[in-house]
C-alpha cells in the first residue's frame, strides 16, 4: 500500500522512478548531476521565484498573500502596530471561523471581529464575516494561484493541490511580512509523494491522508520538508479529493506541499471565475528528491485514526475484526497522553460485538468540501440515524458550498435522515463546538483528534474520544445508526453532482479594500483587547528555574495552551496566560508567577533574593564561582522541559504565554515543528536542546539553572552554552545546552528580547 524509500530517488518524465544515477543514465542515456536534478522539483522553482537572498541554501522568502483567522489576527496586528505598521503591503485576509460563537465570553469574540473589520479598512485588507467560510476554503476559492506562495497563521495553511505553496506559521512570521521583512529558512528537503493506481469506490481523501500520516509521522520521514505530489495517480483524483489529502499533510509535520496540476485544477479555477490564476506545474524531465513515499491508491481501504493522534491509524476492517485488542491498545497508549487524570476505557463501546459511537461530524477545512458532503448525502439517502444517543452534524466549509448543497438537494437528503446541517465553523476541530458527552466516542472528518480537541476537560474529570475518518465512512456509520461501518460495505449510487460557485455570495458580504488603506479609520478596541506587556532584552547572565517537566514523547500546542473556550482570551496576553499548561500541569502558572517576582524586583532596582527567599542559597552558590553577578547583570526567569514540544497548531500563544509569565527558555530533546521553535525565538525565548536522556536528566522540576554569559554566547554566534544546575541540596552540576541552528536575525531577536523590540530598534 505504502512504501518509504530509504534514500533519495530520481523521477524521470514525471512517472519513472530511478533509484540511483546509474539507473538514470541507463534510462535516459544522459549524464545528470544530482545537484542539477534537485533543481527540477516544482518546490525548488517556486521557492527560487520567491527568494530574495540570492542564495538558495539560505532562503529569504516574500509571500504573495497572507491569511489569519480570529484566534490569531488580533495578536498579529497588535504586534505589527507596536512594531511600526502603517499599511498591509500585500493582500491580508482576516477570516472569522474560529471564535464564531459569540455567546462564549460575552462580547469579546464579536469585539475581536470588529477589531478585524476596522483594521482591514484602516490598513487595506480583506475581512470575511463569521459563518461565511472557514479560512482555508476561502483561500482555495479566492486566493490560491499557480506558482504562488501564501503564509497563514494556521497550521493547516495548505493549498498545494491548487499549485500554491502555502505554509502555516506562528503570528510573528506574518508580522515580518507585514513589515516588509522576509521568512528566513534553510532550503528544505523535498520528498516525492508518488501516487499510483486509483481509489476504490467508497474510499475518500481522509483515508488516503491517514494512510500517509500513519506511515510518516512516527519516523519523521517528511519532518520540515516539502511534500511534492507526483505520479500517474494524481490525475485519477478530483480537485476536491486532492484538496482533502493536501490539507492533512500538516499532520505529517512537513513544512509545505505542492502538487502537479492539470485540467482538473484548471477547471477548479474556471468554476471559481479565476482561470487566469491557473498554472500548469510539473517536475522537470529529471528531478531529484531527498526521499519518496510510494502510495498505491488502489490498495487503500477506509481508515480510522483512533484516539489520540492522527497517526494512530488502522483500517476500519482491522478495528472491527480485532475490536477488543485494538481498544485495549488505544487505552494503553492513552495512558501517556492523559497522565492518569481520568479513568479511561473504551470497552463499553462494544455493543453486540460491534463498535458503537455516539457522534459523527463532517466539518472544517478537511471534511466540509462539496464532494465529501455530496457523497455523505448519497450514502445516507433514504435512511435515518435513529433516535438513540448517536448524533450527526455536517458543516459545509463555506456559504457558497452550502448554497449549492441546498440547490442540488443534498442538504434535504441529509436533514431527512436526521442530520443537522450547520454553518461554516472550525469549532469541532479545536474543541469549541459539538462537544460530546463525557466518555462518549466521536468520529470526525476534521484535522486532529488530540485530547481536549473535542472539548472535554481533563482537569474537571471530563474526557471524550475522537477518531478521525472520512466523510463517506462517517455517513455509512450514521446510516447504520452509530455502529462503525466502512463506506466500502455500502452499495451506493454516487451521483457525482457538479459544483457551481456563486461569486455574488462573497461580493455582497465580504469587505475587500482592494489594497487601499484608509488611515482615518479608528480601530475598534473591545475591553478584552490588550497591548503586549513590555519585555526586557536578554540579560548578560541568566538564572532559570525549571517550573514544569513533561516527559510525554510529544507535547502538542493544545497542551501548552489549550484550545476551546480559552481561545476567546487570545486578544488578552495576560488573560490568556492564566490558562497556560492548565490541562497538562495546572500548577505551572503559579510556579512561573512566583519566579517572576524576582525579575520584577530586578526591574525595580531591587535585590531579587529579597523578593524570592529561595534564591538566597542559590545566589550564594553562584557567587562562589561568579562573585561579580548581581542585579545589574542578571536576569531571572522560568523554563519548561519537554521531550518534544510543539506538535500541532501554529498558535504563537504556546510560546507567548510562557513569555508574559516570565519565561526565558524551553529545554527539549528536540522540537516537534519548525513553527513552534520559531515562535519561541520570535518571543525572545531560548530554544535550548539537551542531549541527555529525558528519564535521567541532570535537572528536575524546581531546580535552578544558571547560564553565565548567555548574551555573549548568542552575540558571538556560539552553538552551545555552558550552564550549571543548582538543585535543592545546593549541589552544582555543569551541563551543556545546545542552541541548534540560528540565523543572524534570530540571534538579534533573542538579544533584543522579542520581535517587537527588534523592530522598535
Image: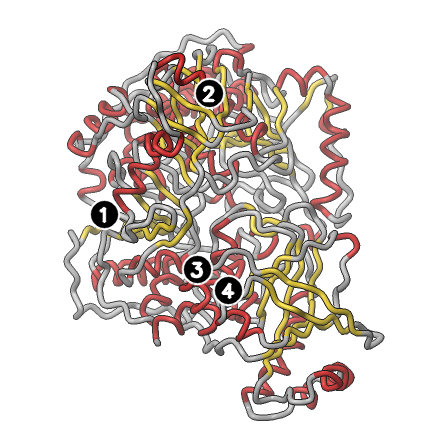
* Closer to viewer: mark 4 or mark 3: 3
Where does the C terminus fall, quadrant-wise?
bottom left
Give the mark nearer the N terminus: 3 vs 1. Answer: 1
Give the mark nearer the N terminus: 1 vs 2. Answer: 2
The residue drawn where x is 31% and y is 16% is 497
Which residue position holds label 2?
Answer: 204
Specify the label residue 606 is tagged with.
none
Specify the label residue 743 is tagged with.
3
The residue drawn where x is 65% and y is 72% is 544
Which residue position holds label 4?
Answer: 656
Give the mark nearer the N terminus: 4 vs 3. Answer: 4
Visible residue check, residue 607: yes
Which residue position holds label 1?
Answer: 510
Q: Secondary structure at mark 2?
A: loop
For marks 3 and 2, give the CA distance: 42 Å
Indicate the position of residue 309 as horizontal and vertical percent values: 61, 37
Visible residue check, residue 391: no
For marks 4 and 2, give the CA distance: 38 Å
Give the mark nearer the N terminus: 3 vs 2. Answer: 2
The residue drawn where x is 67% and y is 51% is 643
User: Could you tell me if the residues under marks 4 and 3 are in contact, i.e. CB atoms within 8 Å?
Assistant: no
Q: Is residue 727 left or right of residue 121?
A: right
User: Could you tell me if the residues under marks 4 and 1 are in contact, i.e. CB atoms within 8 Å?
Assistant: no
Give the mark nearer the N terminus: 4 vs 2. Answer: 2
Q: Secondary structure at mark 3?
A: loop
For marks 1 and 2, give the CA distance: 32 Å
Amino acid at each position: 500500500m505504502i512504501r518509504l524509500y530509504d534514500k533519495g530517488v530520481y523521477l524521470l518524465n514525471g512517472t519513472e522512478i530511478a533509484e540511483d544515477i546509474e539507473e538514470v543514465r541507463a534510462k535516459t542515456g544522459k549524464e545528470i548531476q544530482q545537484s542539477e536534478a534537485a533543481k527540477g522539483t516544482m518546490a525548488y522553482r517556486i521557492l527560487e521565484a520567491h527568494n530574495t537572498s540570492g542564495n538558495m541554501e539560505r532562503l529569504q522568502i516574500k509571500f504573495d498573500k497572507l491569511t489569519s483567522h480570529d484566534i490569531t489576527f488580533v495578536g498579529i496586528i497588535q504586534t505589527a502596530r507596536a512594531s511600526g505598521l502603517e499599511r498591509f503591503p500585500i493582500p491580508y485576509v482576516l477570516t472569522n471561523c474560529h471564535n464564531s460563537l459569540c455567546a462564549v465570553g460575552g462580547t469579546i469574540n464579536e469585539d475581536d471581529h470588529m477589531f478585524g473589520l476596522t483594521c482591514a479598512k484602516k490598513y487595506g485588507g480583506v475581512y470575511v464575516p463569521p459563518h461565511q467560510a472557514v479560512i482555508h476554503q476561502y483561500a482555495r476559492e479566492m486566493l490560491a494561484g499557480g506558482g504562488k506562495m501564501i503564509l497563514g497563521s494556521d497550521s493547516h495553511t495548505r493549498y498545494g493541490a491548487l499549485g500554491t505553496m502555502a505554509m502555516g506559521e506562528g503570528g510573528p512570521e506574518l508580522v515580518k511580512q507585514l513589515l516588509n521583512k522576509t521568512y528566513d529558512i534553510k532550503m528544505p528537503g523535498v520528498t516525492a509523494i508518488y501516487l499510483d493506481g486509483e481509489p476504490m469506490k467508497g474510499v475518500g481523501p481522509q483515508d488516503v491522508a491517514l494512510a500517509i500520516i500513519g506511515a510518516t509521522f512516527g519516523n519523521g520521514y517528511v519532518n520540515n520538508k516539502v511534500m511534492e505530489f507526483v505520479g500517474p495517480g494524481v490525475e485519477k483524483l478530483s480537485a476536491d479529493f486532492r484538496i482533502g489529502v493536501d490539507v492533512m499533510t500538516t499532520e505529517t509535520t512537513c513544512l509545505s506541499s505542492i502538487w502537479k496540476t492539470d485540467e482538473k485544477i484548471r477547471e477548479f479555477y474556471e468554476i471559481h471565475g479565476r482561470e487566469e490564476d491557473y498554472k500548469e506545474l510539473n517536475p522537470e524531465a529529471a528531478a531529484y528528491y531527498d526521499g519518496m513515499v510510494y502510495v498505491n491508491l488502489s490498495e487503500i481501504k477506509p481508515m480510522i485514526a483512533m484516539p489520540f493522534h492522527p497517526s494512530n491509524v488502522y483500517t476500519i476492517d482491522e478495528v472491527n475484526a480485532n475490536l477488543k485488542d485494538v481498544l485495549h491498545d488505544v487505552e494503553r497508549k492513552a495512558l501517556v497522553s492523559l497522565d492518569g487524570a481520568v479513568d479511561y476505557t473504551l470497552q463499553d463501546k462494544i455493543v453486540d460485538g460491534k463498535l458503537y459511537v455516539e457522534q459523527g461530524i463532517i466539518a472544517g477545512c478537511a471534511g466540509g468540501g462539496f464532494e465529501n458532503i455530496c457523497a455523505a448525502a448519497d450514502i445516507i439517502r433514504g435512511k435515518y440515524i435513529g433516535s438513540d444517543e448517536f448524533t450527526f452534524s455536517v458543516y459545509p466549509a463555506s456559504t457558497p458550498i452550502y448554497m449549492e448543497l441546498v440547490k442540488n438537494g443534498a442538504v434535504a437528503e441529509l436533514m431527512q435522515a436526521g442530520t443537522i446541517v450547520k454553518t461554516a465553523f472550525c469549532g469541532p476541530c479545536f474543541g469549541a463546538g459539538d462537544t460530546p458527552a463525557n466518555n462518549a466516542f466521536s468520529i470526525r472528518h476534521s484535522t486532529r483528534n488530540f485530547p481536549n480537541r473535542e472539548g472535554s476537560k481533563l482537569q474537571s474529570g471530563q474526557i471524550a474520544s475522537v477518531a478521525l475518518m472520512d466523510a463517506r465512512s462517517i455517513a455509512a456509520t450514521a446510516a447504520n445508526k452509530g455502529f462503525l461501518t466502512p463506506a466500502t460495505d455500502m452499495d451506493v449510487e454516487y451521483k457525482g453532482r457538479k459544483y457551481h460557485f456563486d461569486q455574488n455570495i462573497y461580493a455582497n458580504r465580504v469587505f475587500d479594500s482592494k489594497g487601499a488603506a484608509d488611515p482615518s479609520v479608528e480601530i475598534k478596541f473591545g475591553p478584552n483587547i490588550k497591548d503586549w506587556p513590555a519585555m526586557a532584552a536578554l540579560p548578560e547572565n541568566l538564572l532559570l528555574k525549571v517550573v514544569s517537566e513533561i516527559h510525554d514523547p510529544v507535547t502538542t500546542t493544545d497542551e501548552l495552551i489549550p484550545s476551546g473556550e480559552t481561545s476567546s482570551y487570545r486578544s488578552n496576553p495576560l488573560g490568556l496566560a492564566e490558562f497556560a499548561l492548565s490541562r497538562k500541569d495546572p500548577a505551572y502558572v503559579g510556579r512561573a508567577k512566583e519566579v517572576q517576582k524576582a525579575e520584577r524586583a530586578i526591574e525595580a532596582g531591587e535585590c531579587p533574593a529579597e523578593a524570592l527567599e529561595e534564591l538566597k542559597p542559590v545566589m550564594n552558590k553562584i557567587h562562589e564561582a561568579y562573585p561579580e553577578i548581581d542585579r545589574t547583570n542578571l536576569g531571572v526567569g522560568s523554563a519548561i522541559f519537554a521531550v518534544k514540544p510543539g506538535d500541532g497548531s501554529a498558535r504563537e500563544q504556546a510560546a507567548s504565554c510562557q513569555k508574559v509569565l516570565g519565561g526565558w527558555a524551553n529545554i527539549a530533546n528536540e522540537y516537534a515543528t519548525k513553527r513552534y521553535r520559531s515562535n519561541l525565538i520570535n518571543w525572545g525565548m531560548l530554544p535550548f536542546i539537551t542531549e541527555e536522556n529525558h528519564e535521567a536528566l541532570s535537572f528536575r522540576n524546581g531546580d535552578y539553572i544558571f547560564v553565565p554569559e548567555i548574551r555573549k554566547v548568542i552575540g558571538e554566534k556560539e552553538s552551545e552554552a555552558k550552564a550549571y544546575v543548582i538543585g535543592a541540596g545546593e549541589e552544582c552540576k555543569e551541563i551543556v545546552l545546545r542552541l541548534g541552528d540560528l540565523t543572524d536575525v534570530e540571534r538579534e531577536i533573542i538579544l533584543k528580547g522579542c520581535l517587537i523590540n527588534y523592530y522598535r530598534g
